[in-house]
Amino acid sequence: MSESQPKLPNRQTLFSDAFKAFIAKGWSPYPNDLPPRLPAADAAAARRRRVSAQFPGQRLVIPAGGLKIRSNDTDYRFRPHSAFAHLTGLGADREPDAVLVLEPTDSGHDAALYFKPRAPRDSAEFYADARYGEMWVGRRPSLEEMAAWCGIRCVPVAELDEHLAKNAEETTIRVVRNADPALAERLDRLRGEIEVSGEGEEEQVQAKDAEFAEALSELRLVKDAFEIEQMRQACAATAEAFAAVVAGLPEAVRRGRGERWVEGIFGLHARHVGNAVGYDTIAASGDHACTLHWIRNDGDLAEDELLLMDAGIELDSLYTADVTRTLPVGGRFSDDQRQVYEAVLEAQQAGMDAARPGAKFSDVHDAAIAVLAHHLSGWGLLPVSPDESLSAEGGQHRRWMVHGTSHHLGIDVHDCAQARRENYRDGTLEEGMIITVEPGLYFKSDDELVPARLRGIGVRIEDDIVITADGAENLSAALPRSSTVVAGCLASLLPTSSRSLRLCFSHRPRRARGRRAADAASPGPGRRPCAHTAPRTWSLPSG
């Protein structure tokens, strides 16, 4: 349920009876035409059937969650819990305080969506409720409209508690606890186990709910066709936003506080073509790039420094890209910057080559980090051999890359986070899985074990790949990775028209086959990058 807002007696004006009578009159009737079915509705129905098969005879409760207060009486923009969105097909900001209930039947489950429909115009909610009223937040859907959207029977949320109480003592009920803790507490009381049986039974109840959360998370490990297409679109939109960021680099340098400027450019595109950014944008210049989750973004951009930009657009369906590019702000890599960049690029390519059906999820990380460990050794940074560093007893290389190389991606930026370890980190890659490949090297400015010439350089390169029948496909290949192509684009296009820039940073190569998950301009491990590998469209003149 939504968090309670404080009462504000000093701002509220009472409504007269005359106003109440007047406000209810003279409105056009609501349209009778029902909205079309959501594109995600059919896929969501198939997912519900899979969940039903896993938990026969059990009542399953999946809340959307409620509104959360940002400050005083203002709320954060609402985003539904990912399990709710995945099983209903609803996205964007729908629907606060809604609850999906899968009620057991002899043949499986019946789905019902409990939510707060719009109030009639003669009710106080219409004009006086700043959270739900039509005059405050716009027209809310009716029960019939919501049912048409998602293909689920809809019921007023006011009837939820009565339904959940029916046969509660003899029905196994599972709930996604973290989606709506207040509802979970009410269900605990309804189940009658905590008060009667003590802490041991409470742990059993919560263990059942944890198993349910695991199952819903693992349901997303392999993406369906709808999800893969959404991820293609999210990556394409993200590439366009990166192009706009590059176009804005000179202005970001000129204005100062350029990290915040480029964050704003990306955010503009995210809100224009999607729901929002999929996570807080990391716009890290210079030494800030060595802070993995730098989201303060209050630094200047300097033409002799690198900008590490980690950002993704979340579509209205809530599927998000997660892409990182490290860009020379002035259009040219220094020799030291290029040295680090090439090592990371080679590591990323090794990780991509390891991503194929039947491989272990951890194989991607192992392949990438092995490349980095050998480079660190060759530069004289490792105090032990690469093999010893890569062993379970070593790990010295992690000083300069403490994070993992990959994570699952989809309706959450860190998708499937509740999946069991044996199915995630120790799991096997399957066709339809979408993961990131994002190695990096981070040499902090105060790291005295690093040569002075490398201090303050942070590089990460990240792409989103889908596992195919015979390898992997790079969904974010529209953004070049080769240092030669990246620098060439920036150097030639920053001071000129943005048309060539869009072509450069939105190139759509032919879909890779087999293990060729990288974009067409990547030099690959052990190969020298060459400007002639750039597709023709990258060098089209402006005009």
Image (tube, rainbow, N blue to C red):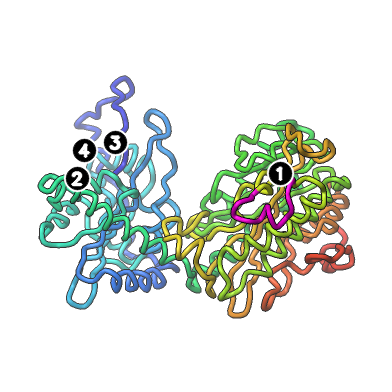
Q: Is residue 209 magenta?
A: no
Q: State how far apart marks 1 and 4 are (Cα).
A: 66 Å
What's the magenta bit mostly, secondary-structure-wise?
Answer: loop
User: Helix, strand or loop at disc 4?
Assistant: helix
Q: Are marks 4 and 2 in contact (CB under 8 Å)?
A: no
In this picture, residue 377 sits left or right of residue 82: right
Residue 465: image x %, image y %? 62, 66
Could you say where residue 538 lies in the image, as x and y percent from the top left? 82, 63
The mark closer to the camera, 1 or 3, is: 1
Q: Quadrant of residue 504?
A: bottom right
Which of the labelled discs sits on residue 21, or is there none? 4
Q: Amino acid at mark 4?
A: Ala
In the drawing, does residue 271 fall left or right of residue 342? left
**Answer yes or no: do the residues labelled 1 and 3 have beta carbons within 8 Å?**
no
> Which residue is nearer to you in this view: 66 or 11?
66
Estimate the x, y position of residue 1 in percent, counting from the top left: 28, 44
Q: Range of the magenta residues?
A: 383-395
Q: Which residue is mark 3?
A: 128
Kindly identify which residue carries mark 2: 199
Give the mark, 1 or 2, whose residue is nearer the N terminus: 2
**Residue under circle 1?**
442
Q: Amino acid at mark 3?
A: Ala
- In the orientation shown, which residue stands out farthest toward the top? 10
